[in-house]
Image: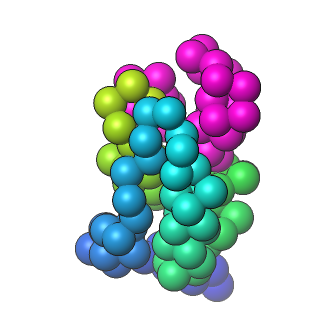
Amino acid sequence: MAAANPSIFNVSKAFAAIPKLHNNSTNFELWRAHVKAAAHTIGNEAILTTAHADANFDKIIAAAIQAKLQNNLFMLINALTTTSGCQKNIEIAHTYGKSEVYV
């Protein structure tokens, strides 16, 4: 039997200490390390790269990540509903300075 997903409270607690990612991504490496640590804390690092079987849980984690972005980056990805989609687009924006969303 698969383990139950962490509660919203536990997800919120795990993501609370993550600093907001600056619009210019100057703190990207620190931010990414915090996100990976939070995902590890809730027992699901794979969600950062692979869609979760529970779409609702995936949306909750995506929203927790989106809450840790400054406005310009938030507006870029706020319509995405998967954690892996958010992560992919944040990394593209950081690496290439893109302002488009890639699904």
**Drawn side of residue 61 relative to residue 52, left or right:** left
Say which quarter of the image contains residue 70: top left
Q: Does the magenta segment cover residue 37?
A: no
Query: In the image shown, does 14 or 44 lie closer to the viewer?
Result: 14
**Drawn side of residue 99 relative to residue 95, left or right:** left
Return the residue found at the far top. 100
**Drawn side of residue 82 relative to residue 8, left or right:** right
Residue at point 44%, 47% (across, down): 21
The C terminus lies in quadrant? top right
Is residue 82 shown above or below 98? below
| Residue 87 in picture, x, y percent from top left | 61, 44
The dominant secondary structure in magenta is: helix
| Residue 98 in picture, x, y percent from top left | 64, 19
Query: In the image shown, does 26 or 96 lie closer to the viewer?
Result: 26
Say which quarter of the image contains residue 13: bottom left
Residue at point 72%, 34% (across, down): 95
| Residue 76 in picture, x, y percent from top left | 47, 23
Return the residue found at the far front. 26
The N terminus lies in quadrant? bottom right
Is residue 69 shown above or below 30? above
| Residue 15 in picture, x, y percent from top left | 39, 67
Is residue 18 shown above or below 41? above
Residue at point 54%, 40% (across, down): 25
Is residue 76 shown above or below 3? above
Residue 79 visible, this orientation: no
Q: Magenta stretch?
A: 74-102
Residue 47 visible, this orientation: yes
Query: In the image shown, does 53 or 72 lie closer to the viewer?
Result: 72
